[in-house]
Image (cartoon, rainbow, N blue to C red):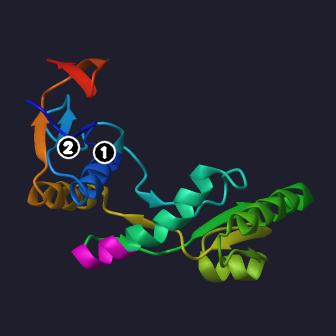
């Protein structure tokens, strides 16, 4: 069969890619070697919605993380996907720890991460009563998401938009041919 676009891998990134492409192109195929979506890394992650604070300044990863965070929260709200903007607290001890947190905050601000705040002992205890630390760095926009619910919604949207799915199909080779690519799959 011929497809305009083929997405290999039905984890959260593959599903989101297929969904987005299906809004722009007809004839999209989503392939995964497993029997269903999300059977690899996407089902074994921490479900954290990152804020982009660790990434190198001006990197594509930082830029996409920051823009993607709000897009993800908006999608989850629209589709009633369970998520919680609970914040992230990074703790440290001693002057070296405080210096590292300060460097991390500077990096986050340079990346465009908003709302980061250095915290003292009392502020940490107010956020997390069972945590004993001298210093903390709090990012209120970090959160968590139910990754299975998210993937279920992304697959549903993709199929609604006409994406064909092929599970239990493993791509063995991709060959450039005139006018496109040919996939050898089993």
The x and y percentages for residue 96 are: 89, 55
The x and y percentages for residue 15 are: 26, 49
Quadrant in which the N terminus is drawn = top left
Residue 153 among magenta residues: no
Q: Is the Cβ of the residue at disc 1 closer than 8 Å to that at disc 2?
A: yes
In the structure shown, which secondary structural element does the residue marked by tag 2 occupy? loop
Dot 1 surroundings within 10 Å: few (below 14), some, or many (20 or more)?
A: many
Numbered tag placed on residue 37 in the rendering: 2
Dot 2 surroundings within 10 Å: few (below 14), some, or many (20 or more)?
A: many
Which of the two marks, 1 or 2, is nearer to us in this view? 1
Q: Is residue 105 left or right of residue 47?
A: right
Q: Is residue 96 left or right of residue 73?
A: right
Numbered tag placed on residue 14 in the rendering: 1
Residue drawn at point x = 53 percent, y = 58 percent: 64
Provide the major secondary structure of the magenta segment. helix
Residue drawn at point x = 56 percent, y = 65 percent: 66
First reached walking from the N terminus: tag 1 or tag 2: 1
Quick check: 155 above or below 182?
Answer: below
State the CA–CA distance, disc 1 to disc 2: 9 Å
**Residue ranking furthest to the right:** 95
Residue 80 is at least partly visible in this image: no
* Viewer-proximal residue among 49 and 156: 156
Q: Specify the quadrant of the image occupied by residue 177.
A: top left
Quick check: 179 above or below 3?
Answer: above
Q: Is residue 160 left or right of residue 66?
A: left
The x and y percentages for residue 108 are: 71, 64
Please report the bounds of the magenta region as a residue range.
74-80
In the structure shown, which secondary structural element does the residue marked by tag 1 occupy? helix
Residue 18 is at least partly visible in this image: yes
The x and y percentages for residue 60 are: 60, 51
Residue drawn at point x = 21 percent, y = 33 percent: 32
**Residue ranking furthest to the front:** 178
């Amino acid at each position: 069969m011929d497809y305009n676009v083929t997405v290999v891998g039905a984890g959260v990134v593959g599903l989101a890619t297929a969904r987005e492409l299906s809004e722009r192109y007809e004839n999209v195929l989503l392939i995964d070697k497993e029997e269903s979506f999300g059977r690899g890394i996407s089902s074994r992650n921490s479900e954290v919605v990152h804020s982009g604070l660790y990434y190198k300044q001006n990197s594509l990863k930082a830029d996409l993380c920051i823009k993607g965070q709000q897009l993800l929260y908006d999608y989850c709200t629209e589709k009633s996907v369970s998520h919680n903007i609970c914040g992230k607290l990074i703790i440290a001890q001693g002057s070296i720890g405080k210096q590292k947190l300060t460097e991390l905050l500077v990096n986050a601000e340079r990346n465009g991460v908003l709302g980061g705040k250095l915290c003292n002992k009392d502020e940490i205890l107010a956020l997390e009563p069972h945590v004993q630390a001298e210093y903390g760095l709090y990012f209120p926009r970090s959160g968590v998401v139910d990754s299975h619910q998210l993937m279920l919604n992304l697959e549903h949207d993709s199929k609604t938009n006409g994406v064909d799915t092929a599970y239990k199909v493993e791509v063995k080779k991709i060959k450039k041919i005139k006018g496109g690519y040919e996939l050898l799959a089993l």
